[in-house]
Image: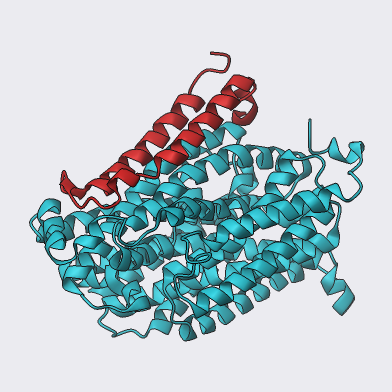
Chain colours: A red, B cyan
Amino acid sequence: MISTQHFSKPTMTLGLAIAAIVLFFARHDLWLRDSTSLVGGLPVSLLYHLAYCVLISAVLAAFLLRKPGA
Amino acid sequence: MILPIIFAYLAVVFAIGAWSHRLFRGTGEDFFLASRTIGPFLLLMSIFGTHMTAFSLLGASGEAYHRGIGVFALMASSSALVVPLAILLLAPKIWELGQRHGYLTQVEFFRDRWRSSRLGLLLFGVMVALLVPYLLIGIKGGGITLSVITGNGVPEWVGSALMTLVVFGYVTVGGLRGTAWVNAFQTLVFMTLGAVTFVLITRTFGGLGPAMEKVARTSPDLLAWGPHVRPLELATYAAIPLSVAMFPHIFMHWLTAKQASSFRLPVIAYPVCIAIVWLPSVVLGVLGSIDFPGLAGPAANNVLVEMIGLYAPGAMAGLLAAGVFAAVMSSLDSQVLSLSTMFTRDVVQHYQLLKRLFGEQSERATVLAGRVFVAGILAATLALALSVDRSLFKLGVWSFTGFTALAPLIVAALYWKRSTRVGAYAAIATAGVLWVHFFRLGMQHPGYTLFDSGVMPVAVILAASSLAMVIGSLVTEPPDAEHLSRFFE
């Protein structure tokens, strides 16, 4: 079961909590708020948020695909 | 050519729902929860398809038309973070308790957890009231799509009614298995056709880069979030996707999982799926400002379909419009099924309503009562959809705000042994009073935020209802240990 198998160790729970907090703050790209420049055809802030979504998936995969106890 | 394609699509959807009936095992648990046999991929597609609705396509593009790319940061990025975490922390526990105690609905769980029938009845009423604006978004979205794509050849109410009838039909025949299969199909359809629409339209501009450069010359403010979104608004919008924790139709999908590990794929893939759906919606909404300048308020709900009509050839327009229908129907079906299940289980069966009224209560009459109830709610919502002329995005945000305000209930029920029914009542009452207060302010002052600071009402209501849950629980007797052992290992 993912809730107990992967988060039975307090360090894993703590790790996920820290990751969630960091990701929450990373969502606020204040430094790009007024930038209208285009990168790869997309507004730079939109590109940042696309990458942000992919990053969240990667972080969650790192937690959930890790073998319990590893 | 457009109408035959849409009719053919609706026929295929109905056929999938009806075909799934062949696997029906003849039990209530099979009809309502597909005998808890849904694996990871189908679970991802059904949960994601249920969650994405006209809000994510028509609403998002309409809002992006006015506010630019910041709409992606407001809703898509926050959903990409909050929704998978909510699934991870809540769904496996709900699934496990559902297996152990045989729950079919959210109300059953809360009623059992806090041993209160009245609390269950109150929650049923609140859930129905909050689902109506959510249903309205879908029903209105379907009507808008068919009307605009046919150049107003089909009145909005006909499109809304047609879609509602198809959904009601296949849900009634196929139950949750049919809904899950149709959802999976429709989710693939709208994700694929969303990408096709995106490529087709940007190509007519000479590619994505030239399209955006054109926007940079006409409306550069739409290419950054700063001009239209305040930092505190961005921060507090993150509370809105927490609504997923309390959606009764998503709760039912959680119960259908084959095993707890089935949630792993939905959790991991959710953020990427969100990006795949929201990117075309937001970019096409922004591009709409070039071809359809000057759309005021809710008129921008149509912008995505107008773009499809303008840039896609006839048959393709029908196909892409079917994609919008797919997104709308994949939510509407689960909402309809959850309403029917809640009414049947939590009102008619729990209170032996038919026996009290008519002296007897057969299984057939119970099911019929559920269908009549849903038909009544859908008819009322359809009538409401024709008279309400609001931004789909804003309607969605108010509905989600209400669900988010109730999220402390599910968190406390699963993680806080000391929580009591009085705490739950206090949280619901606080959420209700504040929601009505802020909703009135929001209607009087569009774009209302707390003291004009950017803080969304949802953050205040969530904080207040959480506090009410804690205070209400602490001032009352703690629950007994034997009862708690049913829910906590």
Q: Position of residue B126 (x, y in %)?
A: 69, 67
Q: Is residue B93 left or right of residue B13?
A: right
* Residue B214 visible (yes or no): yes
Report the residue at 75% width, 52% height from top: B469
Q: Position of residue B328 (x, y in %)?
A: 43, 64
Report the residue at 31% width, 68% height from top: B66
Quadrant (top left/top right/bottom left/bottom right) for the N terminus of chain B: bottom left
Q: Is residue B83 left or right of residue B480?
A: left
* Residue B12 visible (yes or no): no
Query: Hey, which quadrant is residue B105 in on the image?
Result: bottom right
In this orientation, which residue lies closer to the viewer: B10 or A64? A64
Q: Position of residue B387 (x, y in %)?
A: 48, 86
Q: Is residue B468 above or below residue B339?
A: above
Q: Is residue B49 left or right of residue B210?
A: right
In this orientation, which residue lies closer to the viewer: B418 or B168? B418
In this orientation, which residue lies closer to the viewer: B7 or B278? B278
Q: Residue furthest left?
A: B206
Q: Residue furthest top?
A: A70
Q: Position of residue B60 (x, y in %)?
A: 36, 62
In this orientation, which residue lies closer to the viewer: B310 or A36? A36
Quadrant (top left/top right/bottom left/bottom right) for the C terminus of chain B: top right
